[in-house]
Amino acid sequence: MEKLVNLCKRRGFVFPGSDIYGGLGSTFDYGPLGIELKRNVREAWWSEVVRRRFDVLGLDSAILMHPRTWAASGHLENFTDPLVDCRSCKQRFRSSDLSTQNCPACGGQLTEPRQFNLMFKTFIGPVEDSASTVYLRPETAQGIFVNFANIVDTQRVKLPFGVAQTGKSFRNEITPGNFIFRTREFEQMEMEFFVRPDETEEQRWFDYWVEERLNWFVKFGIRRENLRLRPHDLEELSHYSRGTTDIEYRYPFGWGELEGIARRGSYDLDRHSEMSGRDLSYYDEESKSRFRPWVVEPALGLDRAMLAFMLDAFDEDIVEGEERVVLRLDPRLAPIKAGVFPLLRKSGQPEKAWQVAEMLRKSFMVSYDQAGSIGRRYRRQDEAGTPFGVTIDHQTMEDDTVTLRDRDSTTQVRVAVADLADELTRRIGWST
């Protein structure tokens, strides 16, 4: 993990938040490469879950919601962690994370656990009192449930159907850590898939989405042996869950959650109907009856997914007798698709390289680099996860072809400049 953390700062993927002021606990800023990788992961999820399907719609709900939302959802009452304090060094820990009865920092005595609500409070308006208290959302899911009637009324949807959204969520974690694995501010990608209130139907779609989501990670480059399914025990189920299975990844610190697929039943629609007094039922034309659908929810943290993709892509090898750090990211996720290099800084090669870079930039994120030996430039792009290198050399000036280098195999072929964009599109694999 330490090598990846260093790479992320060195190459501009992830920086410590508020770095010039010494940082702010477990907050991170995404640099030029990080934001591109993050965007590509988000787009890959959105394309798979929403854009390519006819049965899933999109939504973007507000971060700030009416405070009764969180009373109805159960978060005010149940969204807690057991907190303990060290009597000696005063550090705080989540007791469920501890394997000993003593402080892991200094060995001191710990207090008895007490429940700590994870939601961040803030205020709306100029007066800071209980009447103006609101919360930063701890999950994006509730925005979907409170908009259920709006979506049914405006979109003429028929069961089964899903509603998906991505966006920031906030949790006042007691012990965040492991880089961007657990942070207080993070981005979620969640989908609520509404089905008929029938156990057979629910189980069929639950199994379907577990398999779909597992295959998505493999499709975009995570090795299957680094993934596993772990059903939750009854005592660890969330207050809303009828059953949950986690897709776990083998992180350097051990197996940990990557995505959770939960059977939420009609818990959320029931609670919001009760608290708001609004009818959140669905009228079924086939049975001529009204009911509240049940829900299957695949929920994924974007930051955590990005971490897993980077960890699985991180590699070190030997190329031409030199050690190399390389991020073998799937080309569809890679922040930069191609690096463009003039072999020499003369003979018209830089000017030609700029022309090629500008041409490709219309379709791809590309970088231009003319500093240092060509080998060093290749290594810089390998480290950034760039899958292809385009070199303008003497032959380019004669026949308008370039050298196209593959990051993983380091093999090189000649490609006509006129065919270069199409060849990169094919190799990136955007059609699959």
Image: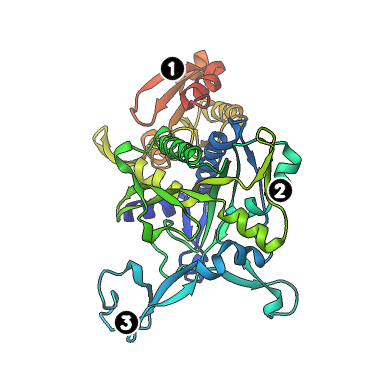
Instruction: Look at the numbered disc 1 and give the secondary structure of its residue.
Output: strand
Q: Earlier in the sequence, mark 3 or mark 2?
A: 3
Q: Residue furthest front?
A: 288
Asked if residue 183 can be seen in this view, the reply is yes
Task: Tell me, for residue 132, which label it has, or none.
Answer: none
Q: How far is disc 3 from disc 2 in space, using C-alphas?
A: 48 Å
Please name whichever residue, 421 or 237, is drawn nearer the observer in this view of the structure.
237
Amino acid type at circle 3 is: Leu
Task: Tell me, for residue 414, which label it has, or none.
Answer: 1
Q: Pointer 3: what residue?
A: 110
Whether 268 is drawn above or below 396: the answer is: below
248 to the left or right of 79: left
Instruction: Look at the numbered disc 3 and give the secondary structure of its residue.
Output: loop
Q: Tags 2 and 1 in contact by the CB under 8 Å rule?
A: no
Amino acid type at circle 1 is: Arg
> In front of the other: label 3 or label 2?
2
Return the x and y of residue 284 as percentages of the image width and height.
67, 38
> In front of the other: label 1 or label 3?
3
Q: Pointer 2: what residue?
A: 149
Q: Residue furthest bottom?
A: 88
Return the x and y of residue 85 as percentages of the image width and height.
37, 81
Instruction: Look at the numbered disc 2 and give the secondary structure of its residue.
Output: helix
Classed neighbour count for the residue bearing mark 3: other residues with Cα under 10 Å, few (<14), some (14–19), many (≥20):
many
